[in-house]
Image (tube, grey):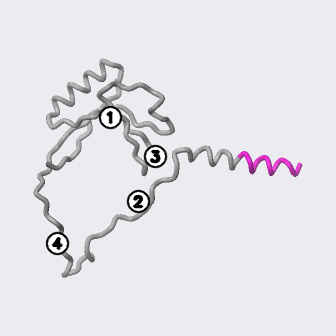
Amino acid sequence: MRLLPILFFLLCSVAATAQDDAGPKPSYCEEAPGTYGTPGGDNAPSLPKFATTPTKEYKVQVAILRFTDPAEYPFHPSLVARFRPCEQVWVVESRQSFSDRAEAVALQDTLKAAGYGGSYITDLVAYQ
């Protein structure tokens, strides 16, 4: 009878370590975002200015994988898998971003014909 609680403890500890196979999250995932100067302060320095212009670009996302290693699956050559450590997920998306939405739609149609029926287009901001 005393063996039952020990077995239960071992089973729980093995299950807990098996769930964290992706590794610990980086420290910046838990840190609060830094502030620039003091809020409402009169002597806060101005933000730096850069000679860039924001432009809208598009990517085609195919899947978001949790608890799955994308190395086990072959993907279309135009796709890449990227790990997001804070969310602990893999995002499978187009290697290239497109400034013209029509080009992204053309790639989406190509991927749908190849069997990626759940693909969708995401908007992003790029700086040039």
Over which residues does the magenta segment extend? 1-11
Q: Do callouts 3 and 4 mark residues in contact (Cβ within 8 Å)?
A: no
Looking at the image, tell me whether mark 1 or mark 3 is earlier in sequence order.
3
Vertical comparison of 78 with 56: above or below: above
Q: CA distance from mark 4 to mark 1?
A: 37 Å
- Tag 4's secondary structure? loop
Q: Going by the image, does 32 lie left or right of 3?
A: left
Q: Which residue is mark 3?
A: 88
- Tag 3's secondary structure? loop
Q: CA distance from mark 1 to mark 3?
A: 16 Å
| Residue 46's disc number | 4
- Tag 2's secondary structure? helix
Say whether residue 110 is magenta.
no
Q: Which residue is mark 2?
A: 28
| Residue 123's disc number | none
Name the kind of residue labelled 4 in the image: Ser
Q: Going by the image, does 91 lie left or right of 100?
A: right
Looking at the image, tell me whether mark 4 or mark 1 is earlier in sequence order.
4
Name the kind of residue labelled 3 in the image: Gln
Looking at the image, tell me whether mark 3 or mark 4 is earlier in sequence order.
4
Q: Going by the image, does 118 lie left or right of 110?
A: right
